[in-house]
Image (cartoon, rainbow, N blue to C red):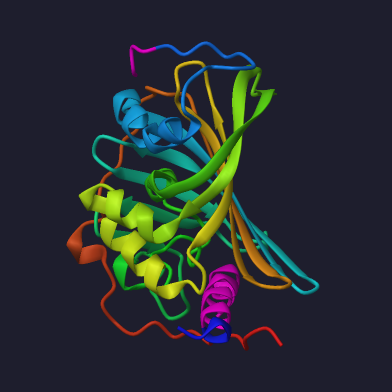
Amino acid sequence: MDRRKATAGVLAAIVLTAVAGTGCSGRTVAVQESTGDDPRAQMRRVADELAEARTSRVRSRMELRSGGTRLTIRGAGGFDFRRRMGRIEVTLPDERQDPVTAVIAPGALYMKNRGAGVPEDKWVRVDPAELPDGNLVSNGVTDPLVAVELLRGVSSVRYVGTRRLDGKLVRRFRGTTDVRAAAGEASQGRRDQLSAAAKGFSTRAVPFEAHLDEEGRLRRVRHTFVFGNDEAVVSTTELYAFGTSVEVELPPRADVYTGRIATTTPAPPA
């Protein structure tokens, strides 16, 4: 895919989201300066560790950087890693607009308050694998499980020390992951999404920073998706309160809107 076309398409989708309303594992790893464990192996198994943790609360932050444009979209909710489902309230830059409710499920993304022309009491259903980026960034929040599965394609990583995160000591790692390699190693439920991203992005390499707690669980991951010299999306996913009760239900079929969504696609960056 042409780099310019990929950049314009993904960035336009993010901006469209921003303005849509207007139109536990038993294994313990000590946190210390040197663990003796292979960092690449640690990154590749974080998805398995979260399956053991079962559930968590989620905070997300997505920042669009394009020339002089800066847009920040925030999310908060919960995720069930066993069921591979979650519910996140996405707060748009325009605080006058209601949050977009996103229900994430295997093979489907449901959104409420998303898109002009959709009745207020209806949901919109999207197949993430049909989006050009596999829904890594295009709807304002990265699927937490996809963010984690993306680390299965780690190509290089180094340990950079410790820090405090929410009062807990965590280990920090920085590296690069390969989207296509991650797609080949991902679980069945998210493989199609990463395969779509591998085809849609102009570059397969994604820089990241990951924080692991003393039990080897991912607490924060930040991916930087670069589209040009001054165009990037920085997506940060934070996980906390592991094991907390998380209830996620799919919207009733009768509440899913099947009509046309009347939206205006913004002009691509100059």
Establish if 206 lies above or below 1. above
Q: Residue at the spot x=65%, y=66% of the render?
A: 232
Residue at 57% from the left image edge and 14% from the top image edge? 31
- Does the segment drawn in magenta span residue 10? yes
The picture places residue 179, in percent across and down from the top left corner, at 42, 59
Is residue 126 in view from this perspective?
A: no
The boundaries of the magenta stretch are 6-27
268 to 191, vertically: above or below: below
The total number of labels drawn is 0
User: Looking at the rendering, in which quadrant would you find the N terminus?
Assistant: bottom left
Q: Residue at x 53, y 45 (%)?
A: 156
- Asked if the magenta segment contains residue 223, the reply would be no
**Spot occupied by residue 227 in the image (x, y as percentages of width and height):** 61, 72
Left or right of 97 on screen, residue 200: left
**Horizontal and vertical percent for residue 83?**
24, 39
Residue 266 location (% of width, % of height): 60, 85
Magenta: main secondary structure equals: helix
Q: Quadrant of residue 251?
A: bottom left
Q: Residue at x 58, y 44 (%)?
A: 175
